[in-house]
Amino acid sequence: MHALILLSLLAATTNYDLIVDDLVADTRRAAAAYKMLSNAGVGAFPALLKRLDDQTIIENGNFQEALVNGSSGKLTKPRLGRVAFCLIQSQIEDTWPKSIRDYHALTEQNIVEWLNTYQGESLGELRIHALSVSLESVSNDISKTECTKQKVDALEFLVKKLKIEIAHQFKKQ
């Protein structure tokens, strides 16, 4: 019982700002920090949002998913702000096939406004909102241009994810 109370107190007093700092530490500490922030869910979002503009380069070799092509076409080392964004986006939108990533609801440009719009909602609710926005984006794209296999694949992928998320939320109730 005391261990449960201690864990609850520890969770309530976790300083996510310090854990975000550890993302630029050595490989082991950075990996542990990433896992802690991922497991924290929406609780870590405020600390991550504060760092979206952080240009600190991460030299530890972690976070390959955050590598982006520079104007030269070469891969660049990720910056802390990009990793903070990816942490939030991956928790809300999960992993998508590369061919449909243009339909992500969340971008580095809209993440703050988007999360402010849905402030106070659970991670599951945020996932449902993001999937709905992405579905609408694909649908709008189809109505304006031709219906391609890529767009049909995007619709099928998103509908499947939405069904899974709604079923998961329904089980919680």
Image (cartoon, rainbow, N blue to C red):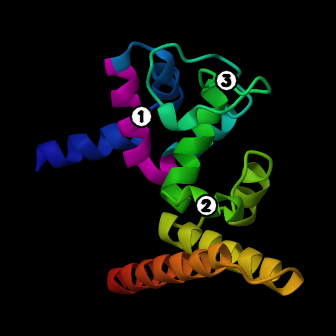
Mark 3–mark 1 Cα distance, whole angstroms, equals 25 Å
* Residue denoted by label 2: 99
**Secondary structure beneath label 1:** helix
Residue 114 left/right relative to 66: right
Q: Are marks 3 and 1 in contact (CB under 8 Å)?
A: no
* Residue denoted by label 1: 34
Residue at 70%, 79% in the rendered image: 148
| Above/below status of 140 relative to 46 | below
How many neighbours does mark 3 have within 10 angstroms: few (below 14), some (14-19), or many (20 or more)?
Answer: few
Q: Quadrant of the C terminus?
A: bottom left
Mark 2–mark 3 Cα distance, whole angstroms, equals 20 Å
Q: Amino acid at mark 2?
A: Ser
Residue 118 left/right relative to 170: right
In this rendered view, identify the residue nearer to me: 38 or 151: 151
Residue at 29%, 47% in the rendered image: 8
> Which label lies toward us, 1 or 2?
2
* Residue denoted by label 3: 74
Across and down, in percent, residue 123 comes to 50, 64
How many neighbours does mark 1 have within 10 angstroms: few (below 14), some (14-19), or many (20 or more)?
Answer: many
Find the magenta span and give its range.
28-43
Disc on the earlier residue, 3 or 1: 1
Mark 1–mark 2 Cα distance, whole angstroms, equals 26 Å
Across and down, in percent, residue 86 comes to 57, 43
Q: Amino acid at mark 3?
A: Lys
Disc on the earlier residue, 2 or 3: 3
> What number is the disc on residue 89?
none
User: Looking at the image, how many numbered discs can be counted on the residues?
Assistant: 3
